[in-house]
Image: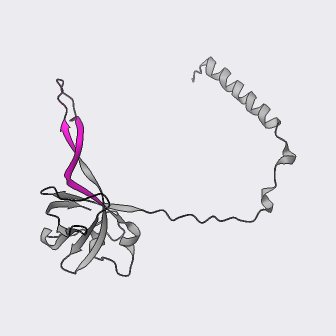
Amino acid sequence: MILYNIKSITIMEKLYEKLTEDIKKIDINSIKNWSDDKVRIDIIQKQKEYLWVKIYLREEVDVNVGDEIVIKYLETGEELKTIFFYYGKKYEKMGLDVVVPIPVMHEIGDDEKILYVLVDQDDLNKTEDAATYIRTLFRQSKYYEHQLIKRSELIFTNSRTNEKLDYYDCVF
């Protein structure tokens, strides 16, 4: 058995009556016949999709938002240009006197040893002149494969400063 609130039923009835009255007031002769119109196509700018790489550095480096970071795989010589987007965040546990089932974290600022760089997915998926091995590292890419790679074979370089980034891990 379902019980309804009497107030909600009266409100719904009033809304229904209002809607019915509004529909009756519509002048049907003023409505344009849309079936006579031709199909209209508006071309809009293609939406960009980006994949990101998270780079864990051993020490802070001079990098600015918008800097071009080049990923180079030494075995094949292929390169992939990325854009530095933002730093990771630092967190600390909040000092609480009560026991909580999950750790409560508190953001305390940017961690300049964690870099996020972006790759345009269209650039990654181009068949000609593509970084065929590097694109297999991206989990969201249609070319993804499980790969084992040495840190010494994959180099990240800041194009603005020509500095090689000393990293200990990266996540594609």
Q: Main secondary structure of the magenta part?
A: strand
Q: Is residue 14 above or below residue 127?
A: above
Q: Using the image as rendered, state which of residue 150 and residue 148 is in the foreground.
A: 150
Q: Which residues are magenta?
A: 90-117
Residue 85 on the magenta segment:
no
Q: Quadrant of the C terminus?
A: bottom left
Q: Is residue 113 magenta?
A: yes
Give how far across and how far down residue 120 sits, in percent: 38, 66
137 sits to left or right of 21: left
- Where residue 114 appears, x then y in whole percent? 21, 54
In the displayed structure, does residue 2 sit left or right of residue 50? right
Which image quarter is the N terminus in?
top right
Residue at (44% x, 63% y) in the render: 48
Residue 37 is situated, as x and y percent measured from the top left of the image, at 77, 62
Q: Position of residue 166 (x, y in %)?
A: 13, 63
Tally of numbered discs = 0
Seen in the image, is 94 located left or right of residue 49? left
